[in-house]
Amino acid sequence: LLRPNGGKLVIVHPQGAMHVIGQHQANPVMVSRGLPTANEWIDLIEKFSDWGLSLEHVPADPRSDGDIKDGYLAVFKKT
């Protein structure tokens, strides 16, 4: 449950999206898929607009320097 008007949902993985993709490739039973990309989040927010979420911080591309340096971070804001 998010607070209305400003509540935040933070999704983080310290080792990054590329690490999760590697885990999925190594053991797809345990890790069923990679982390959602920015475009997947945007599509989901548009599809479920009644959720009232906006993407405040877009996760870095899995193969980018940002993902390697900072890990995976997606921040949503309840509107």
Image (cartoon, rainbow, N blue to C red):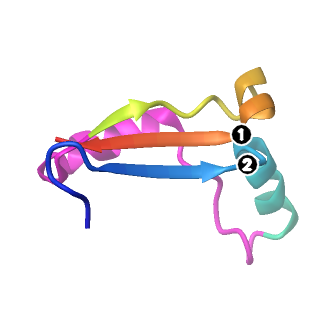
Residue 33 lies, in percent from the top left, at: 64, 60
- Dot 2 lies on which element? loop
| Amino acid on which the number 2 mark rests in the picture | Pro
- Residue 8's tag is none
Question: How many numbered discs?
Answer: 2
Q: Is residue 30 left or right of residue 8?
A: right
Residue 56 lies, in percent from the top left, at: 37, 31
Report which residue position mark 2 lands on.
14
Eyeballing the image, is 62 above or below 33?
Answer: above
Residue at 27 percent across and 49 percent down: it is: 7
Q: Nearer the viewer, residue 61 or 57?
A: 57
Residue at 74 percent across and 76 percent down: it is: 30
| Amino acid on which the number 1 mark rests in the picture | Gly
Are circles 2 and 1 on residues that touch, CB within 8 Å? yes
Residue at 59 percent across and 50 percent down: it is: 12
- Dot 1 lies on which element? loop
Eyeballing the image, is 2 above or below 6?
Answer: below
Please identify the quarter of the rendering in which residue 76 is found.
top left
* Residue 16: in magenta span: no
Residue at 18 percent across and 53 percent down: it is: 51
Crowd rating for badge 1 (residues with CA inside 10 Å; few <14, some 14–19, many 20+): many
| Between discs 2 and 1, the one toward the N terminus | 2
CA gap between label 2 and label 1 equals: 5 Å
Report which residue position mark 1 lands on.
71
Quadrant containing the C terminus is: top left
Q: Which residues are magenta?
A: 28-53
